[in-house]
Amino acid sequence: MASDTPDIRLTGLTKVYGDVVAVADIDLEVERGEFFTMLGPSGSGKTTTLRMIAGFEDPTSGSIELAGADVGRTPPYDRAVNTVFQDYALFPHMSVGENVAYGMRVARVGKRERARRRDEALKMVRLAEYGDRKPAELSGGQRQRVALARAIVNQPEVLLLDEPLGALDLKLREQMQVELKAIQRDVGITFVYVTHDQDEALTMSDRIAVFNQGRIEQVSTPVELYERPATAFVAGFVGVSNLLERDGRRFTIRPEKVRRLEPGAPPGDLLTESGTVSDIAYAGMVTRYRVELERGGHLQMVTQNVEGAPGDPESERGEEVLVGWRPEHAVAVSGKKLTEEESE
């Protein structure tokens, strides 16, 4: 994966629409062979950044390099990238094989080479037997794989994917996440993936850039991003997080790191606080508790339902409890305090 020259280098990249700053002076490098995800809420600048890399939008300022070459003045069709969109954009009157081979036909690739690469791409996305079918005869997941094959067959240096699984139902989306990651490993192409789905980003990515209001808050591996969020926004947006302020220090604790102590149990090396259970939600594998703390603020914690479902939630609501966490699990964060909506 490592290379002296990254596949993508963005320097001071900015995009302004009138009075709106969509992307604000970002610097970013994507290494060769990475599955790199740009994660953030709607309007955070991630899709605009992807479109500038593809050449569909011109930067207001800053530079874009692909494999070390500045492509600021290069049109989209001359950049060594392909883009896969959420709507697939397949030609309904063409067969699957014809859709996959279309770009090569436009580029005047020889018929024999075209057929070889088409068949190879369809095999790679596990659709080798579907070449003669029309897109309307396929499921949503299969159409997505056809769009992926059509992009891969042109042998781009970088594949850009703009929320490609957004139109699929949850079960199919989860299945496609596994398949996309496996395909990326097989072809070795750099994937740059845009999504607002945190679970999707954590599942698939080598590294993730979290966007917020046109800026990048943090670039890290999934583990580092989840376990050591750098800002209050990242802590609240990536997964569920508790944000507390104590003695002038702002820190975050993940719900699964919070323990409920038995009455009278010694705290050991845990930091503890007293509180009252204000809400309980059964969620299958786990039960979620919200605890209002005596010192102010609240915590969410989860318990695994290893021994079956918990007892009557009504009997626990209003109960006084002692909760604790290990000091190293309280991670200091910067940035504004999240609103109630952002933190849950």
Image: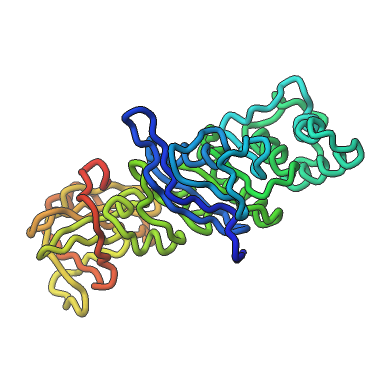
Q: Nearer the viewer, residue 51 or 120?
A: 51
Position of the N terminus by quadrant: bottom right
Q: Does residue 15 sit above or below 188 in this rendering? A: above
Q: Nearer the viewer, residue 312 or 196?
A: 196
Q: Quadrant of residue 56?
A: top right
Which residue reaches farthest right? 112
Question: Which x, y percent locates residue 299?
Answer: 20, 56
Q: Does residue 287 sit above or below 1 in this rendering? A: above
Question: Which x, y percent locates residue 125?
Answer: 72, 45
Q: Quadrant of residue 131?
A: top right
Horizontally, is 204 left or right of 151 in the view?
left
Horizontally, is 65 left or right of 202 in the view?
right
Which residue reaches farthest top? 93
Please tell me which residue is depicted at 87% across the width and 43% down the height of the picture: 116
Question: Which x, y percent locates residue 152?
Answer: 71, 44
Q: Does residue 269 sit above or below 6 in this rendering? A: below
